[in-house]
Amino acid sequence: MDVMGDKATLFETGRFVQPSGEEAEADPDVDETGEAAEEVRLRLAADAGDVEAASVLGALLLRRADLDQAEPHLRAATAAGDRAAANNLGVLLHQRGYADEAAGWWRIAAVAGSAAAAHALGRHHRERGDEPAAEYWLRQSAEQGHVLGAYALADLLEHRGDYGAEQWMRVAAERGHREAAYRLARALDRRAAERGALERGAADSAEPGRAGRTDGTPGAGPGATGAADRTAAGRRTGAVRDTGPRSGTGLGVPPAEEAEQWYRQAAARGHRRAALHLGAILERRGELKEAGRWYLTSAKDGEARAACALGFLLRDAGDTENAAVWWLRAAQDGDGNAANALGALHAERGQPQTAERWYRAALDAGDVNGAYNLGLLCAEQGRTPQAEQWYRHAAYAGHREAANALAILLLQGGDTTGAEPWFSKAAEAGSVDAAFNLGILYAGRGEDAAALRWYERAAAAGHTEAALQVGIARLRDGDEQDAELHLRCAAGGGSAEAAYRLATVLDARRPRPSAHELGEVVHEKTECEEWYERAASQGHRRAQVRVGMLAAARGDVVEAARWYRLAAEAGSRNGAFNLGLLLVREGSEPEAVVWWTRAAREGHGRAALRLALVYARRGELDEGQRWADRAVTLGPAEVAERAARLRDALRQELTA
């Protein structure tokens, strides 16, 4: 709380007033020439016994900090019963250090009906620790319409956890008090967040295992850190605890919407933190241009977090140079997030020493992400002991992704026993990657039930590969419906394997295609074909073969050949075999032999049998017998049987 009587807060507290019909604060922008003339007039009137002139003159001198000349005029006006003079006399005495005597004059003015004096007296009692007396006088001031009295009363009630705090905070905000508007917005923000948490909790309890997505970054399991953005150092704005129910003009308006209105009002009056929060709301909504304007306003007023947020906004727009300027400004003001962002920027530019310096600056600013980022930097440089040291530093401070990264580092070093508890700690703290990695750890031990539990947890949080593993497990258990749900989630998240498996599930349900009356097949692309194609376009070899087969069934030889060739070139023996079949039909047997040879060498029995037949027809009996032997070995049974008959026939031909 501000020290009463300080010149800088004289007008802010409202203790200084002018006695002119209504009690208003003195205007600091009065023209100096006019003020001098006014002072002469007031002195003459005061010397002639004009009480109001003496009071106004005392107020003018008090505003000028000429306490010695102001005091006799204020005392004279106070003795004549001027309540504004009594209030200003209290201000003067308080500035001189006579707090108790000042309170006495404020009491006289307050009893006479001065709202400003009641406010000053209430603050005096609060500074003395007498909260009941403080509440009494602040309430008197607030109920008389004094905006600072309403704000001070709201502050006192909020401190005590009284439900009436918001009502008075709203009153002060509606009368233009910018700090009240900001604090009211914060309270509404908290309420909106709590309501959202309750709704999410209700949804989670209604559907076990179907929790919504979180902010976790999908990872690839052991061997990868699972942290995609080294500048993701947490949210730039926070929330404080709620204190009471909404009342007044906010009834019927969603808390989040009303909060934005109050942030906007406070920001328009120059409140830099309100401008920061307003910018964050607009950025989340995608209104980036306006968000940038409010961030800029707040940053220019010295808000480091706004400068940092503005930097991120510029970076996302591709303007890294200006982003670095604002990050530098924020980092120099002690913002650890900005220091981390600068570190990441220099790391991307191949300047590890500068990056390390900024990461250390972030850590010095109290941002534990600095330690985590130092660990990442050391790991990239192959400095494993230092990486482990920094990961441990961050993990012990509660950084969940650092705990996950530490566990991965230990696992890579063969320390499974040491890795498991860090995976568990990170997963319990909400790391989606760690939950998935625990699933891999348990699956590697053959503990499938435990692995599935962690996969399910990661999948519920939106982890693509975990959803795939759950889908596979459900298929194995015969729960096709639940398997489809998980495979759809994984496929939608970009998993080619999930798209392929989902396509096979849908393919198995597909009825046989019906023929047109005239014998022409009418083809419409089904959903399963779309998923096959999505997987194929992501390089999934089996999906590419299947798409080629579907194209061949439609009679689209060119498309079929394209997909078979892609699969074959990627190492698919089925793709190579099918491509060979297609080439033979098109009269390109020599090229078909090339692809069958590749397939046979990779263990494709049918390709080996085809080669045996080709060489037998050509009269190259030894080569034909060799491939027939290979086909017998590779199988399957039907192929092995035919290959054995061919081999025997070739032997007889060779020995005849």
Image: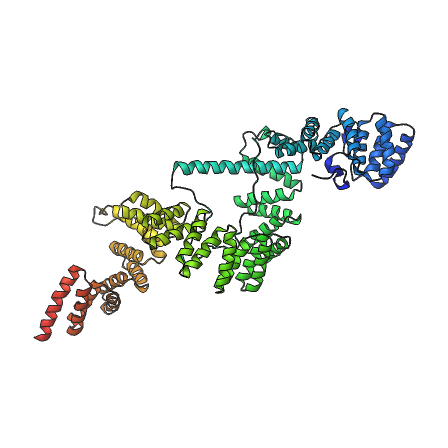
Q: Answer left or right for 218 relative to 183.
A: left
Residue 285: x and y in percent read 52, 43
> Residue visible at 92% across and 30% down?
47
Quadrant in which the N terminus appears: top right
Q: In this view, does 433 lie above or below 106?
A: below
Image quadrant for the C terminus? bottom left
Residue closest to the eye, 649 or 485 = 485
To which quarter of the image does residue 563 belong? Answer: bottom left
Asked if one can make out residue 91 in the rendered structure from this viewpoint, the answer is yes
- Residue at (35%, 48%) from the top-left corner? 450
Specify the farthest residue to the bottom: 655
**Position in image of residue 108 (x %, y %):** 78, 26
Q: Position of residue 428 (x, y in %)?
A: 44, 47
Depth check: give the residue in front, 490 or 244: 244
Whether residue 487 is visible to the viewer of this picture, yes or no, is no
Q: Quadrant of residue 332?
A: bottom right
Q: Nearer the viewer, residue 295 or 50?
A: 50
Which residue is rendered at x = 62% and y = 38% of the image?
A: 182
Left or right of residue 514, residue 49 in this image: right
**Residue 122 x/y as whole percent:** 71, 31
Query: From the viewer's perspective, is residue 351 above or below residue 228?
Result: below
Q: Residue furthest left?
A: 656
